[in-house]
Image (cartoon, rainbow, N blue to C red):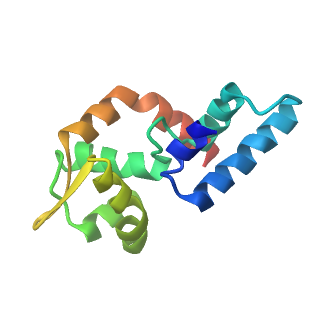
Amino acid sequence: MGEIARRSRFTPRTANYFLKRCRDLAQIKKTDLSKEVVGEALELLGIDEVGLSPADRKILQVIMEKFGGGPVGLNTLAASTSEEETTIEEFNEPYLIQIGFLERTPRGRAITGLGSKHINKAGDNLFARTQTYL
């Protein structure tokens, strides 16, 4: 259950949602809720090992690939990712800043070295796989 807590950004509502989805997968597979089932369920949801969602990774990838790492303004970032400005500002951005993957500068948002490293490590595999489930 520690895996669920860690990947849920330590947010109880998100942890409960993940737990329900993990339990659903365990029921479908007719097995107990194990670490393997939790890992598989979270992968199907597109949640990586540090708790990034497909939307989080898309934001980081867009900043890195389209804007050379940034900085990029919120309005432009929202248009480029097809996300609402308020969603980025209130949901995605705080966690990405908290874990050191994104920084907010006077000129806009920029990906950090740590964020670039994580996106490069994950490669396109997880991002491409999760697009299937969206």
Which quadrant is the N terminus positioned in? top right
Instruction: Locate residue 86, reporting x and y percent.
Output: 39, 74
Residue at (89% x, 30% y) in the render: 30
Residue beneath the point at 33% across and 35% down: 119
Which percent across, then down, holds residue 127? 47, 37
Could you say which quadrant of the image residue 92 lies in? bottom left
Observer able to see residue 57: yes
Q: Is residue 132 visible?
A: no
Q: Is residue 109 left or right of residue 118?
A: left
Query: Residue 126 at x, y = what percent?
Result: 49, 33
Residue located at (32% from left, 48% from top): 99
Q: Residue furthest right?
A: 30
Please report the residue visible at 67 percent of the width from the left and 25 percent of the height from the top: 36
Q: Is residue 68 left or right of residue 41?
A: left
Q: Is residue 77 above or below residue 75?
A: above
**Viewer-closest of 79 and 15:** 15
Left-right relation of 94 to 71: right
Write down the quadrant of residue 26 in the picture: top right
Q: Is residue 97 above or below residue 119?
A: below
* Foreground of the two, 78 or 45: 45
Q: Is residue 28 above or below residue 10?
A: above
Give coordinates of residue 37: x percent, y percent: 71, 30
Figure check: 78 above or below 58: below
Which residue, as the protein is rendered here, is positioned at the far left? 106
